[in-house]
Image (cartoon, grey):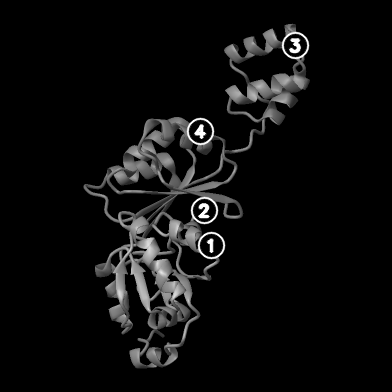
Amino acid sequence: MGYNLDINFLNSLVVRENLTPGLYVVSTPIGNLSDITLRSLKILSSADLILCEDTRVSKKLTTKYGIKCSMEVYQKHNSIRKIPSIISKIKNGKSIALISDAGTPTISDPGETLINKCIELNIPIFSIPGASSIITSLIPSFLKKDSFSFLGFFPRTKKEQNIYLDRLKKSEETIVFFESPKRILKTLSLILSYIGDRKATLIREITKKHEEIINLNISNIIKELSNRDTIYGEITFCVGPAEKVKQQLEMDEKFKFIIEYLQKENVKISSIASIMSKITNFKKREIYQYLLKNKKVS
């Protein structure tokens, strides 16, 4: 049975308190404003100043919960310039909360430089846990969850894309990244052409009214999205790990030629395996086992 939490009752739980001077890194909801912890509300209610990316966005949260606190814009365009005054305020006994438009600050958001400066100056930092689009998106996927990497937004330049795609191709763990709705089809097509058709999960508008979770192969996700006139919302995309090579390693003719040449030059098997792992998508161990079973390449 559902119920609406009375705002007066909530305010009675979130009593303003005197905070220790320092920087409070506070996680905020990634869509649904109800996904806020009582501790986060207490910190935001008690802080002397809230640093945010956009006051218009953050005021939706503070207004909903009746939080009255001074707010200042802190984003990538003014972060370096504002750090000295922020540090000065904390040294003078102020408690400052750092939030982003959504989720956990410093994860694809500004804040890392400020945190590093506080560490350098031994200024107390308090990390207040809460919503994270990375974990929230990974949970409903049908992909491996015990080992994963988050790589941020898919890069725009070809050089960075190649590095990214090479890591995806060889990865034995799930890879999570962000992408814009305008670029998602182009990015998925690029990934498909480079690493093949793997299991993947696309999460759109997570925690929001029009939340959507698609667990399919990459090619089928492309087909699903291609049928839409427009793709809306924030997107998180998870790519499953490369499948283990179960059968004997197969080499194409040009790689066999290189191995044969190295063997004729009496190069050690371990050295050949090391060389070949750098020019193929196979691991050194897999190539080493292949060489042991095929001492003479035909």
Which residue corresponds to mark 2?
142
Marks 3 & 4, CB-CB < 8 Å contact: no
Give the CA separation, mark 4 to mark 2.
23 Å
Figure check: 39 above or below 167:
below
> Where is mark 1, residue-wise?
119
- Sequence-first disc among 3 and 4: 4
Which of the two residues, 224 or 146, is positioned nearer the viewer here?
Answer: 146
Q: Residues within 10 Å of mark 1 (few under 14, many from 20)?
A: few
Question: Which residue reaches farthest left?
Answer: 229
Local SS, label 4: helix
Distance from the alpha carbon under mark 3 to that under mark 2: 42 Å
Q: CA distance from mark 3 to mark 4?
A: 30 Å
| Neighbour tally class for label 4: few under 14, some 14-19, many 20 plus, Cα within 10 Å | some
For discs 3 and 4, the disc positioned in front in the rendered view: 4
The image quarter in which residue 38 lies: bottom left
Which of pointers 4 and 1 lies earlier in the amino acid sequence? 1
Question: Would you name the residue on which mark 3 appears?
Answer: 296
Which element is circle 2 on? Answer: loop
The image quadrant where one finds the C terminus is top right
Q: Residues under labels 2 and 1: Cα distance?
A: 38 Å
Q: What amino acid is found at the position of numbered circle 1 in the picture? A: Ile
Identified at 56% across, 43% down, the residue is 241
Task: Indicate the position of residue 46 as horizontal and vertical percent values.
Answer: 41, 83
